[in-house]
Image (cartoon, grey):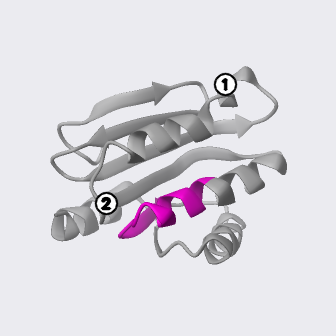
Amino acid sequence: MIVCDAVNIAKTNCYEINVSRPENCVELTFKGYWDESEEMKYYLDDIKAAVDMLKTGFIFIIDMSDFIGCISKYLTTTIEAQKYLVSKELKVTAEILPTNPIFRPICEMLSKESGMKTLYFTNRCYAQGWFLLNKN
């Protein structure tokens, strides 16, 4: 985990969401493959609950290191979640991408569609260093 003093909002086999109010940050970890599982039932509600705990200008960190992919319907859900973040005055998103090179262009397309400002990292250490310099 990159953020400190975090409260766990949700933990499933597909994702985990932690919020740090002192650091005004959400950390979302994607896991495995997202299919029609019940594990995804509350994903969007969990994102909204996490963001609603923070002040405007928050940072959103997404760790996709252990993410394999998803069925296409979750691309639309992702855009909807990102638009919600933007509407709540997100400062910036930091995405830690898996080693598969196909993820970056997909993530760039989703961010462009939603209007979300995103920085991309190849590992957690780089993202953590950036976060420590840019929090609050």
Q: For residue 134, which quarter of the picture?
A: bottom left
Residue 27's disc is: none
Point out the stretch of residues depicted in magenta. Answer: 81-95
Q: Camera-side residue: 95 or 53?
A: 53
| Residue depth check, mark 1 versus mark 2: number of the one nearer the observer | 2
Residue 93 left/right relative to 134: right
For the C terminus, the image quarter is bottom left
Residue at label 1?
39
Give coordinates of residue 119: x percent, y percent: 44, 73
Give coordinates of residue 14: x percent, y percent: 61, 32
For the N terminus, the image quarter is top left
Give coordinates of residue 85: x percent, y percent: 49, 59
Residue at label 2?
58
Compared to residue 122, the image places residue 36 above or below, namely: above
Q: Indicate yes or no whether the magenta region holds residue 52.
A: no
Q: Camera-side residue: 103 or 17?
A: 17
Real-space Cα separation, disc 1 to disc 2, in angstroms: 26 Å
